[in-house]
Every structure is written in structure tokens, then in C-alpha cells.
Amino acid sequence: MGGTVARRREQVLDAAVEVLGAEGARRLTYQAVDRAAGVPPGTTSNYFRTRAALIDGIAEHLLAPEHGDGAAPATEPAPVGPGELAAALAAFARHAAGPGRARTAARFALVLESSSRPELRAQLGRGRQALLERSTEWVRRLGSGAPERHGRILVDHLEGVVMRQLTFPEGTFDPLEEMRALVGALLGGVPAGTRTD
């Protein structure tokens, strides 16, 4: 019985992520989530008694390691050179703006929601901090003279590139060249146009 309840809750949260990512926070309603999940009316409200509880549930769901994006830099092995770092960042951006688009858009929607909810901001901040720590460690291993600053610049740029693609989509999206240029500028490593394969 407990397993069934847990699976149904996961089903509801998966649907809530899709609704939030595809339609935005204003259209995140119990009814919309019930429809997207294909569950009886009232199911979502049974699990999450308030909208704030639903938002918190979505944030927890998105940040859980078992639900993380497979291409996320935080889960990838450390790159062995600037070229590999640029390629890893570009691959994550392509995934986040492509197959992972709904989850990415949902995360951005939660960031906006957190402007009026400090407790949500703290929760989301933990996920960002993990990414910053990984990015900092990567550039430190690659010889950065200012790893914390360079790690933050890479994460900020990555988020900006993905946001740009979500907001103003390009037909063919591949930020590899700009990632090479940025990594090369920060680390004195790989110039634009250098192959990494």
C-alpha cells in the first residue's frame, strides 16, 4: 500500500513539473496537475493541501538526486582538460534546453517564485551551491588561478545560455563554440574552433 501511495505521489509530482515547466506558475493548479497526471480529480490536493506545499514538493522532487538530469555537470566525472570542460558544459546546455526543457523551465519558474519565499530560495540555493562547488573543483583541477570566481562565471554563463534558448529559441542550438571561447579565456586553454573529439 505504501509503495502505491509513493508511486502515485511521484506521478503527481512528475505531472506538476511538466505543467509548471510548460505553462508557468499561474497555470499550476490542482486541476491542471490532476489532468496531466491522469489521476482522479482531487488527487493532487490530497497529497498537497496548499499551493505552497505543492511548490515545495516540486522543488524537493527536482532537486532529489534520483530525479536529477543525467547530463547535469554535478553528476559528470571531472573533465581532464579545457576542451572536455567546454564540451561538458555545452552538452548540459543542449540537454537542459532540449530533452530536459520542461524540468529546466520549472526550475526557473521556482527561482522566480522564491523571490517572495525565502525558505524556497534556501532550498533552491542548495542545488545551485552543489553545482558551484563542482564547477569550482573542475576549474581548480585545470589550473585556474581564481577557481571560485571562474567556477561562478561558468555557472552563471551556463544558466544564461540556457535561459536565452528557452526564451528566444534558435533553430539549431549548440553553444560549444562559445563555451570553448569562455573556458579558453578563463583558463588560457582551448581556443574557439579547437576540436575536442
Image (cartoon, rainbow, N blue to C red):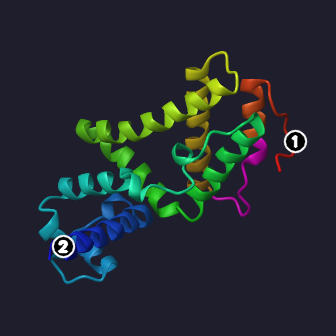
| Residue carrying label 1 | 194
Front residue of this view, candidates 197 and 187: 197
Front residue of this view, candidates 164 and 129: 129
Residue 144 in the image: x percent, y percent? 67, 21
For label 1, the SS is loop
Q: Tell me the CA gap for discs 1 and 2.
A: 51 Å
The quarter of the picture where residue 40 lies is bottom left
Magenta extent: 169-178
The quarter of the picture where residue 117 lies is top left
| Residue carrying label 2 | 5
6 versus 166 height, above or below: below
Residue 106 in the image: x percent, y percent? 41, 57
Q: Amino acid at mark 1?
A: Thr
Front residue of this view, candidates 115 and 121: 121
Q: Amino acid at mark 2?
A: Val
Residue at image position (43%, 33%) is 129
187 versus 21 height, above or below: above
Per the image, is 177 magenta? yes
Of mark 1 and mark 2, the one earlier in the sequence is 2
